[in-house]
Amino acid sequence: MRKIKAGLIQMGLKADPAIDSIETIKEKMIAAHMPLIEEAARQGVTVLGLQEVFNAPYFPAIVDDKWFDAAEPIPEGPTTQIMMETAKKHGLVLISPIYEKGKDGKRYNTAAVIDADGTCLGSFRKVHIPKIGHYDEKYYFAPGDLGYPVFDTAVGKVGVYICYDRHFPEGWRELALAGAELVFNPSATPKGLSDHLWNLEQTGAAVANGIFIGANNRVGTEPAFGNHVFYGSSYFCNPRGEILVQGGDEKDELVVTEIDLDMIREVRDAWQFFRDRRPETYTRIALPS
């Protein structure tokens, strides 16, 4: 059996954007994550996912040009460098989502995938960028242009799909067809429009694609950004759509479970969704809306 122990961290903001500089906020958020990362290592976690833009508040709830300065290059930027050192120190694969300043001058909502030896294997850039209610992500993030990469890590084949991406089944299928066994969906999702979907969409995607999914969401409120309530509830689900473990909706938490990657073959052999696909009949999926 190919069993691994996987973890997710959900966390509230540990700084006051009205007082603290962007660099101070990053320092406080990284510092707050370290004890939970260390605890994950003590529990034997070998792959760990952090939440969307984990080192900052979720600033797209307002429009303010100063947050452009929060973007960093990957892997040369300070946050990714710290996470590379941390992954190597603890011997775990780390999913590190930050606001990225690309070499092309554009800014992206990105997750770096760092292997257990501290090597940055590459990144996934959020593909689908929403403008919904008070959240104007299109103001801050260019659409991802790296496709749907799957990374061959120390624990297996890992993919990433970020927050709003989860509403688009096409990307889940792209990741699964590319060989992903475990896909992380780091999120920053407040109560209101989508919380009733939280336990439905990722479990459905896991079933449809025969993969494990780890979905995490921040907690608490961020008064400077509309006081929205983030509801946590981070979880892992298996290829049968069963939730293996789930965090609460109010507090910082490390969510850990054991994953048997051999279940993927067992489930796919039973259902044969990939065998019975008819891509030649899907004439409208890739057409513009």
Image (spheres, rainbow, N blue to C red):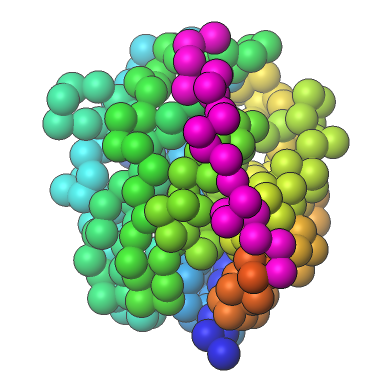
Q: Is residue 94 left or right of residue 244?
A: left
Residue at the extreme bottom: 1
Q: Is residue 24 left or right of residue 62?
A: left
The residue lying at 47 percent from left, 78 percent from top is 46
Which x, y percent locates residue 4? Answer: 54, 81
> What range of the chain is rendered magenta?
270-289
Q: Is residue 148 above or below residue 168?
A: below
Q: Is residue 100 left or right of residue 283?
A: left
Which x, y percent locates residue 132? Answer: 64, 14
From the viewer's side, name the closer residue of 28 and 65: 65
Which x, y percent locates residue 14? Answer: 56, 46
From the viewer's side, name the closer residue of 52 and 207: 207
Tell whether position 282 is magenta. yes
Q: Is residue 218 above or below residue 121?
A: above
The residue lying at 80 percent from left, 56 percent from top is 248
The residue lying at 48 percent from left, 11 percent from top is 288
